[in-house]
Structure formats: structure tokens, C-alpha cells
Image: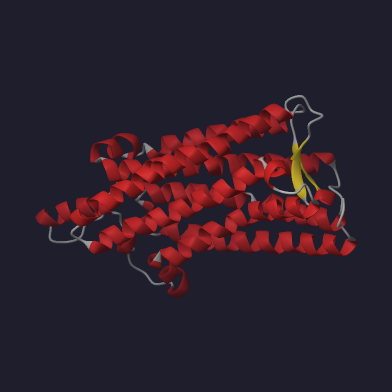
């Protein structure tokens, strides 16, 4: 492969290992903060963000291992390379599905109290997680079989499906449909969300509630936009990028850095998370409560003059 040297093997391999470990640590801090915060974790949107993050951070392990593959320029055993694909690709597909579910959740939560309770009330949010987990399992089984494989290729610094196997192309097409199709679905919901926020801004009496809704929207939108760019380039690189070693390398690093974008945007946008990580301050994160939830809290205060948490 043109442009590859022993020096670049070491540089790229070590960079993969450093970035994947850094992403995992950053994500762990964010996820643990969300999980421990009672106010944040009661919100369906943050539950989706949490599980989205879990599937995302699992990908850091195969990315770290592929750094070793790159430095040594060997996968040691074909089964090990296959195992890394079984971990990485199904987790990313599930991550993509959860971004779609998150966009739907944001739209429903802003649109209707009744629909929000119907789709996500009580424990119903778990149904969506189970659906995503079922798709994850299907991809795991497909890529674990002897008929389909995606594996890391050290001298390309990237991944590819083994087209010599009969079902690899079908698994790849299904993956592409989910990831590319999900772009348009999420985009549709976010257009509706933005339109609704612009129309209803003047009706919000509490500016903090509106600002909090915008913060959650920013987090969810950045996730979707980054996935959009990555998915389009990943599945259509031959149309949009020169077929060169460094194009493959850049796309692979985009995939690795996918696990860095989200904790960074969570940290920047959400003051409550920033406070808890920076100062280990106790207390609630009411600044992250959405407009819909704030209205329910306000109703509670009419009968009880204290701010009451809403349980789903």
C-alpha cells in the first residue's frame, strides 16, 4: 500500500491506542455522571444517550487492539481479527439505531404529553433499548458465522468486509441501509423539532427551560451530524475520496473519534455534568430538565410547595 512505512505503522498504531483509551476514559466519566445523577437519568432522552454511549464505548476495545495490529502488521490469528469485527460493527450499528430513537424521543417529548407517555412512559423506554439490542444480536450472529466477516487490515490501516465469503455483501448492505437510511429519518425529526421550538419559543415563560431544551437538542444534533458525515463517507468513499491509504486511515480515525465527539459535546453543553466532573459537587441537575418535564414539575409545586422530581 503506497505511503506505508515502518515509521507510519508505529505512529498510526500508537495513535489508535492512545485515542481509543482516551475516548473510553472520557466517555466513562460522562456515563457515570449521567447514571449517578437522579434528575438526568430519569429523563428518557438521557437514558437513550447513556445506552448509546455504552455501545459506543465498547468499540474502543477493538480500536485499541487494531492499534496493536497496526504496529505489528499482523492480526496474529484470523479468528482474533474476526472477533474484533464482531465487537466493533454490531455496536456501531446499534449506536446508529439509538441515534434514530433519540431523535424520535426528542420530537415526541416536545409534541405531546400523551404520546410521550404512550411511547416512553414508565418502563416503555426499555422496549426501544431491547429493539436496538436485538438488532445488535443479529449482527453479532451474522458476523460470527463462517459466511460473513468484517476484519481489520493492518496494511490499509482500516476495515473491510471479506467479499470472498458469500453473505458478507448482504451484511454490508443491511448495515449501509440502517446507517444511511437513519440519516434521513433523524434529519426529518430534527427539522420538525427545530420548527416546533421556533414556533413555541414565545410561549415558554421560563427561559431556563427553553435553554435547557436547546442544550439537549444541540447534543443530539451533533451526534446525528457527525454520524451522517461518517456514514456517508464510510459507505461511499470511492465516490467522494481518493482511494488512497490516507483516505482509509482518516475514515478509520473518524470512526475511533466517534467515541470522543459525544463526551466532549456533553461536557461543553451541559453545565451540570461539567460541574459534577470538575468539582464532584452533589445535588441535582435541574438545569438539564426539559420544558416538558419542567411543566410537570411546576404542576407538582401547586399542591406541594417544594420542587418534586418526576418519575417515569
Going 20% across and 56% down the picture, which residue do you hit? Answer: 202
Q: How many marks?
A: 0
Picture layout, residue 181 above or below residue 305: above
**Residue 141 falls in image quadrant:** top right
Going 56% across and 38% down the picture, which residue do you hit? Answer: 180
Question: Where's residue 26, x and y in %?
Answer: 56, 63
Residue positioned most to the bottom = 279
Question: Where's residue 55, x and y in %?
Answer: 56, 47
Question: Where's residue 301, x and y in %?
Answer: 14, 57
**Residue 11 falls in image quadrant:** bottom right
Question: Where's residue 297, x and y in %?
Answer: 21, 54
Residue 241 visible? The answer is yes
1 vs 111, nearest the viewer: 1
Color theme of the render: secondary structure
**216 relative to 203 in the view: left or right:** right
Going 46% across and 73% down the picture, which residue do you hit? Answer: 278
**113 relative to 119 in the view: left or right:** left
**Residue 286 falls in image quadrant:** bottom left
**54 relative to 245 in the view: left or right:** left
Residue positioned most to the right = 6
**298 relative to 170 in the view: left or right:** left
Residue positioned most to the left = 303
Going 42% across and 56% down the picture, which residue do you hit? Answer: 218
Picture layout, residue 263 above or below residue 237: below
Picture layout, residue 157 above or below residue 167: below
Rendered-image quadrant of the C terminus = top left
Residue 38 visible? The answer is no
Amino acid at each position: 500500500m503506497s505511503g506505508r512505512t515502518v515509521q507510519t505503522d508505529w505512529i498510526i498504531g500508537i495513535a489508535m491506542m492512545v485515542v481509543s483509551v482516551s475516548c473510553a476514559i472520557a466517555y466513562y466519566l460522562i456515563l457515570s455522571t449521567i447514571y449517578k445523577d437522579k434528575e438526568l437519568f430519569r429523563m428518557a432522552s438521557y437514558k437513550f444517550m447513556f445506552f448509546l454511549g455504552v455501545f459506543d464505548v465498547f468499540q474502543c476495545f477493538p480500536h485499541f487492539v487494531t492499534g496493536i495490529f497496526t504496529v505489528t502488521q499482523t492480526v496474529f490469528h484470523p479468528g482474533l481479527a474476526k472477533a474484533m469485527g464482531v465487537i466493533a460493527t454490531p455496536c456501531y450499528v446499534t449506536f446508529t439505531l439509538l441515534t434514530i430513537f433519540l431523535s424520535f424521543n426528542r420530537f415526541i417529548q416536545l409534541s405531546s404529553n400523551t404520546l410521550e407517555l404512550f411511547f416512553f412512559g414508565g418502563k416503555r423506554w426499555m422496549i426501544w433499548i431491547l429493539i436496538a439490542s436485538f438488532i445488535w444480536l443479529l449482527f453479532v450472529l451474522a458476523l460470527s458465522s463462517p459466511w460473513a466477516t468484517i476484519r481489520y487490515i493492518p496494511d490499509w490501516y482500516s476495515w473491510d468486509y471479506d467479499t470472498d465469503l458469500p453473505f458478507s455483501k448482504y451484511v454490508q448492505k443491511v448495515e449501509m441501509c440502517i446507517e444511511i437510511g437513519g440519516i434521513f429519518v433523524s434529519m426529518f425529526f430534527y427539522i420538525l423539532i427545530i420548527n416546533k421550538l421556533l414556533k413555541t419559543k414565545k410561549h415558554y415563560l421560563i427561559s431556563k427551560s427553553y435553554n435547557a431544551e436547546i442544550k439537549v437538542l444541540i447534543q443530539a444534533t451533533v451526534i446525528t451530524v457527525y454520524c451522517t458525515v461518517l456514514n456517508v463517507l464510510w459507505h461511499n468513499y470511492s465516490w467522494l475520496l481518493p482511494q488512497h491509504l490516507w483516505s482509509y486511515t482518516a475514515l478509520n480515525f473518524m470512526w475511533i473519534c466517534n467515541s470522543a465527539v459525544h463526551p466532549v459535546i456533553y461536557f461543553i453543553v451541559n453545565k451540570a455534568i461539567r460541574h459534577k466532573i470538575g468539582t464532584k459537587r452533589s445535588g441535582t441537575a435541574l438545569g438539564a430538565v426539559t420544558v416538558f418535564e419542567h411543566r410537570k414539575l411546576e404542576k407538582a409545586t401547586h399542591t406541594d410547595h417544594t420542587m418534586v422530581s418526576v418519575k417515569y
